[in-house]
């Protein structure tokens, strides 16, 4: 009923609530000293060096440029957020709310597939997305910038399916941002594009 009365507000509040729960889950894991030095620590160290003018390097990787490991230019766009609160927890919170935002995109895609009607299936899709084990595992396992490809690509598809040029442009921008997540972004996008074409 809430989705029928105020869909934008309801799905936004739900996404924020799920993001808070996901953030708390990953933060509790981190505070229990279960984070991995090979993942979260490398990225946190890299962000620290980046925002303090030391370059895109990690002392944990022998002061090598992180581009020698993976291509994740999206980290440069996340750096200003990290600079506000330069702690490992900031990365975990960004990841949690980013992943949670994908549920709203799934809702709008499903609702468009139902010709704008609020079918029960459209209302259930964000719950299925949020409960999906790989999504929850991606949130729980340290920080990885490629996890943000999922919500960015979903919101890109949502925008590209709209009729207005503004929405299509927004979708194109988000698609390009998703490609900045990791070098494997092109392969992921190719799979999404193929499913989109076949789904019709």
Image: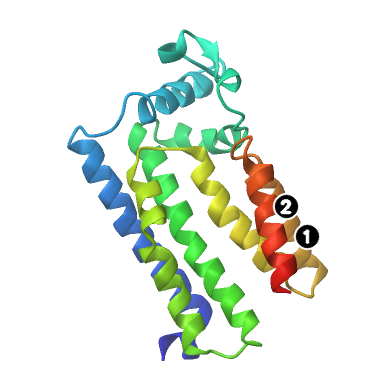
Pinpoint residue 59: horizontal percent, then vertical percent: 43, 11
Q: Residue furthest front?
A: 198
Residue 21 location, quadrant: bottom left
Q: Residue at x 17, y 37 (%)?
A: 32
Quadrant the C terminus occupies = bottom right
Return the mark for residue 169.
Answer: 1
Residue 147 shown left or right of residue 74 in the figure: left
Kind of element beneath mark 2: helix
Report the residue at 67% width, 64% height from top.
Answer: 195
Residue 62, given in percent of the width and then of the height, sits at 46, 8
Q: Residue at x 79, y 75 (%)?
A: 163
| Label 2 close to label 1 by CB (< 8 Å) | yes
Q: CA distance from mark 2 to mark 1?
A: 6 Å
Find residue 173 and name its label. Answer: 2
Question: Compared to 182, does 19 lie above or below?
Answer: below
Q: Quadrant of residue 198?
A: bottom right
């Amino acid at each position: 009923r809430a989705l029928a009365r105020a869909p934008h507000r309801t799905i936004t509040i739900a996404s924020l609530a799920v993001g808070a729960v996901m953030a708390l889950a990953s933060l509790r894991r981190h505070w229990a000293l279960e984070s991995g030095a090979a993942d979260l620590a490398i990225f946190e160290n890299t962000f620290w060096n980046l925002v303090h003018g030391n370059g895109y390097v990690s002392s944990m990787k022998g002061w090598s440029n992180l581009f020698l490991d993976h291509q994740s230019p999206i980290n440069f766009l996340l750096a200003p957020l990290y600079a506000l609160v330069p702690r490992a927890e900031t990365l975990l919170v960004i990841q949690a709310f980013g992943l949670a935002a994908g549920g709203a995109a799934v809702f709008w895609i499903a609702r468009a597939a139902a010709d704008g009607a609020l079918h029960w299936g459209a209302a259930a899709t964000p719950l299925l997305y949020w409960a999906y084990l790989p999504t929850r595992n991606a949130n729980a396992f340290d920080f990885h910038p490629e996890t943000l490809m999922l919500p960015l690509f979903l919101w890109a598809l949502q925008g590209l399916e709209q009729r207005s040029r503004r929405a299509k442009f927004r979708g194109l921008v988000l698609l390009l941002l998703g490609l900045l997540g990791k070098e494997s972004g092109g392969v992921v996008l190719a799979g999404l594009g193929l499913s989109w074409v076949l789904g019709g």
